Image: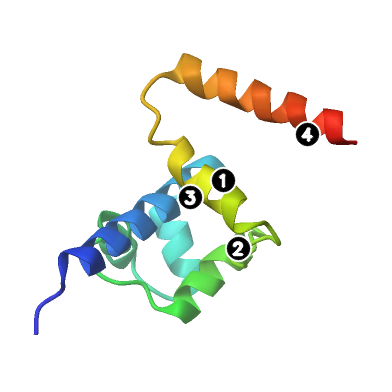
């Protein structure tokens, strides 16, 4: 049985996140691969979404950058807000929303 489109989308999203983490951390594909016990070609496949990264390799990758894979203790509403935030096309609107939320949060304190 082939991969569903949803499975493919998840692999691409995970790969994009791994690449962003690696680039922000200044780690090459070769160095990341060596750290988690795979070739740089395999890292390329993970990052492109061509191959699925196993849970154990994902945990190893996160540990390299001292990143937690657990969801923080946030409400369902907060997680929905975060999930939809990057879908807002206008950077000005995203900035305004971020200021609004920050302002509302400080009023609660």
User: In screen coordinates, is 31 left or right of 103?
Assistant: left
Q: Quadrant of residue 105?
A: top right
User: In screen coordinates, is 33 left or right of 60?
Assistant: left
Residue 101: x and y, percent? 67, 30
Q: Quadrant of residue 99?
A: top right
Labels 2 and 1 touching (C-beta < 8 A): yes
Q: Which residue is mark 2?
A: 64
Q: Which residue is mark 3?
A: 22
Residue 11: x and y, percent? 29, 63
Total marks shown come to 4
Q: Is residue 48 in sight in this rendering?
A: yes
Task: Give the spatial CA distance, label 1 vs label 3.
Answer: 5 Å
> Is 105 above or below relative to 74?
above
Outermost residue, bottom direction?
1
Q: Which residue is mark 4?
A: 105
Residue at the spot x=65%, y=57% of the render? Answer: 75
Task: Give the spatial CA distance, label 2 vs label 4.
Answer: 32 Å
Q: Which residue is mark 1?
A: 25
Q: Is residue 27 in sight in this rendering?
A: no
């Amino acid at each position: 049985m082939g991969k569903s489109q949803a499975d493919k989308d998840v692999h691409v999203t995970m790969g994009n996140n791994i690449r962003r983490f690696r680039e922000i951390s200044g780690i090459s594909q070769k160095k990341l691969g060596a750290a988690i016990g795979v070739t740089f070609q395999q890292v390329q496949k993970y990052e492109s979404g061509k191959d699925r990264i196993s849970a154990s390799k994902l945990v190893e990758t996160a540990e390299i950058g001292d990143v937690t894979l657990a969801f923080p203790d946030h409400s369902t509403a907060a997680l929905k807000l975060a999930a939809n935030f990057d879908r807002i096309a206008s950077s000005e609107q995203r900035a305004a929303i971020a200021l609004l939320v920050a302002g509302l949060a400080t009023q609660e304190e």
